Image (cartoon, rainbow, N blue to C red):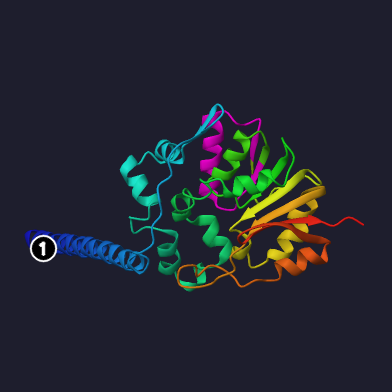
Amino acid sequence: MRRVRDAVGARYDRLVERRRRLAEQVDEASLRAAERLYRRADALVARAFRRETCPVPGPDATGPLTIDVVDDLVAYTRLPREVVERLIGRREPMSFRSEWYGAPPELRADHWHYLASRGYLFGNASHFTGTRELDLVAASVPAGAAILDFGGGTGNLAMALVARGHRVWVDELNALQRDFLRFRVARHGLADRLAVVDPWADLPAAAFDAVTAFDVFEHLPDGRAVLERRLLPALLDGGVVIEDSPFVRNASNPMHHADWGLGELLEGRGFAVVRRDGHARVWARLRD
């Protein structure tokens, strides 16, 4: 009788083991299929923007500071340089757009999308590597001005402003970009001139000669509240708001918002446009 029980038990154990192995094989096959489908979906999103070109920025030396976002990204991510360059140049499928289109609608909330995005680390690395924004700021603030760069991304503009003698705070929502910028600050020894502020931390009142916001306000569903409660109180009397806000919502920019009344708000607070460069505007408070 015992031999029969042992034989039955052994057969049962073999059956359980076969089922376990079969389940593992099915799971592994499912994961491999999912990986292929994710990559195919990612590539389909990239295909919609295949005509888009994004040059990889080279190093920019101003005074003792050399700004090379590619070199900094390689050191920060520990990815091969050719991979970083492909990601910046948008020759790799992974992007902030595939994150948006690949996320369930309930996860496309503005705050969570911008806070959590990986793609923006590379998508913003090519921003503000020319002189247009720098020239506009230089024409609008005194030498050595204190500047709050709102939505400063990877910090290219902030670092260029620091290289030109300004003191800069960067207010950035995206957690990865904030961490990367803190890495850049430490790497280049800029802690005494460039501060990175968390979005939940208070800003000092009446502390800045300018608030810069290039390609930022169109991303905010609550832009009025952000300006009134956070940014305008941080301006010195006589300080300026320098912004470029393309309020265009389309397939390329599905996360943008329509104009929520930026101009009307600033005009209602006593500001007027005193300088333009293309779509960029400098707003100063009119004096009586």
Quadrant housing residue 38: bottom left
In the image, residue 196 sits, relative to residue 112, either above or below, namely above
In the image, residue 108 sits, relative to residue 123, either above or below, namely below
| Front residue of this view, candidates 131 and 48 | 131
| Horizontal and vertical percent position of residue 268 | 82, 67
Q: Residue at x 55, y 70 (%)?
A: 248
Q: In the displayed structure, does residue 182 sit left or right of residue 22?
A: right
| Horizontal and vertical percent position of residue 273 | 74, 60
Q: SS of the residue at dot 1?
A: helix
How packed mark 1 is, by other alpha carbons closer than 10 Å (few <14, some 14-19, many 20 or more), is few
In the image, residue 220 sits, relative to residue 138, either above or below, namely below
Residue 115 within the segment the image draws in magenta: no
Q: In the displayed structure, does residue 25 sit left or right of residue 218?
A: left
Q: Is residue 222 visible?
A: yes
Residue 177 within the segment the image draws in magenta: yes
Q: Residue at x 55, y 52 (%)?
A: 174
Query: Quadrant location of the N terminus?
Result: bottom left
Provide the residue designation for mark 1: 11
The kind of residue tagged 1 is: Arg
In the image, residue 44 sits, relative to residue 55, either above or below, namely below
Magenta-drawn segment? 169-195
